[in-house]
Image: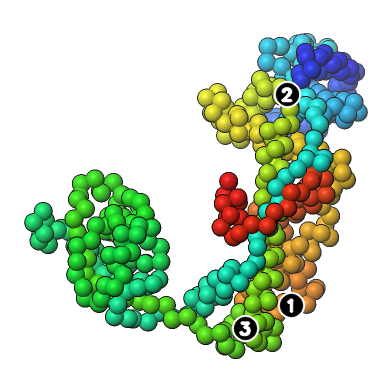
Amino acid sequence: MNILREDVDALNAVLKVQISQEDYQSKVKNELEKYRKSAKVPGFRPGHVPVGLIQKQYGKSVLAETLNKLANDGIYNFITENKLEILGNPIPKEDASSIGDFDKPENFEFSFEIGFSPIFEIGIAGKKFEFPKVIIDDTLINKQIEDLQRRYGKLTSVETAGGKDMILGKFEELTKTGEVKEDGISHSTTISLEFLDKKEASDLLNGKKLNDTFELSPSLVSKNDADKAAMLGLKEDQLASIGDKFQFTISDIKQMELAELNDELFGKLFMDGEVTTVDQLKTRIADDISKMFSEDSDRILTRDVYNFLLEETKMEFPTEFLKRWIKISSEKPVTEEDIENEFDTYLKSLKWQLIQTKIFTENNLKLTNEEVIDHTKGMLIANYAQYGIPAPDDAELSESAIRLLKNKEQANGIYDRLAEQKLTAYFKSTVSLDTKEVSYDDFVEIASR
């Protein structure tokens, strides 16, 4: 067997696989003999079917299978031996017919197209990237403590609305003259003063009392059409057919009574004895949110380097080859229009995959089985701690981790997180970090870019 490489351009080539009779004859003969031994043909005992009959019945299909295997094996061996960096897989050449006659088999030639992976460089060494760090001050710590108190607090009914109270009541549709509309919309809902966007709404509702009835536009206390429809018990497409004239009657006002900062709350939040005083609570919260925001800072850096690399790393792709390969290799039928619509997204994903692979290869970054198991065990320990349950011994943890990793979706997620951690560590050691301390609000704005 002989394989010839014909370069079309820097990104595309054709591999021609030339297969002679000597390459396939014995293999075809052996396969036909297997068929002869197992074939059940009326009038003949098993294993005694004439070779000619087997040849006539199975010869062409066996020859085709043998040639296909020889061609594929030959192609991949050629690619491996010559260390060709290709994208996707070789595909039969579109405008070339195979050379050879299945009725009078002698020599055959098959042509395959291949697309080369682009040659590129990664230029981030020494590049400066913003690295924001949240200022952990008393305001932020106290807000976190209040959130915990609210989460473990209880709702009590009060007479007058204010602050962050929740107002329960009923919307009733009004006529133009201000009367309750007969057969109009009537729906009970809840309005949270904490989440009102419009000052006019807050001013109107603050100070209102139990059983008060007053005119209230649903648009004033809703964030958008979907929110408004939910308040009125409607579907969003029904809003166009109704007005905005409603009255609202308060049936209850709920106020959050914050949980006390005492041993009972500390016991719910932490393992026994970990935190016993408010000062210890503040220290623990400061440590926890510092770690959380540190991880967020890493994610922001990784996002920014990712965007930079995608924008600045220049690559040329064998576009037409890739479009054909996508169409041929897709599990479900795809149209040319489908491919065109999704191709830019596909190229972006492929580009990042090539960049990531190059970084891992050139810097000898690897994910070991031990690292994966340890990370998974850490996840399990964190889950136990979340519910205040002591983690089992190491042997049981390891068994649980291995079971979890047998779930393909879970395993992929874990591998992706570990790969990102490796990349982040590489980025932090390679680029120049412009570290800036920022307020929580500014940090949120940076993270949402």
Q: Secondary structure at mark 3?
A: helix
> What's the residue type where badge 3 is placed?
Val
Q: Nearer the viewer, residue 185 or 24?
A: 185
x then y, percent, for residue 185: 19, 58
Residue 432 versus residue 80 in the image, above or below: below
Asked if residue 358 can be seen in this view, the reply is yes
Q: Who's the residue at 74% across and 49% down the image? A: 434
Name the quadrant of the N terminus: top right
Q: Nearer the viewer, mark 1 or mark 3?
A: 3
- Counting labels gives 3
Q: Which residue was labeled with disc 1?
A: 392
Q: Secondary structure at mark 2?
A: loop
The quarter of the picture where residue 35 lies is top right
Few, some or many residues within 10 Å of mark 2 (<14, 14–19, 20+): few
Q: Which residue was labeled with disc 3?
A: 278
The quarter of the picture where residue 13 lies is top right
Residue 102 versus residue 408 in the image, above or below: above
Q: Who's the residue at 70% across and 80% down the image? A: 390
> What's the residue type where badge 1 is placed?
Pro
Query: Is the residue under label 3 in contact with that under label 2 (CB below 8 Å)?
Result: no
Q: Who's the residue at 73% across and 27% down the image? A: 315
Tell which circle, 2 or 3, labels the residue nearer the N-terminal end. Answer: 3
Q: Nearer the viewer, residue 360 or 129?
A: 129
Q: CA distance from mark 1 to mark 3?
A: 30 Å
> What's the residue type where badge 2 is placed?
Glu
Q: Which residue was labeled with disc 2?
A: 316
Q: CA distance from mark 2 to mark 3?
A: 60 Å
x then y, percent, for residue 83: 88, 29
Q: Nearer the viewer, residue 318 or 178?
A: 178
Q: Who's the residue at 82% across and 41% down the image? A: 126
Asked if residue 86 can be seen in this view, the reply is no
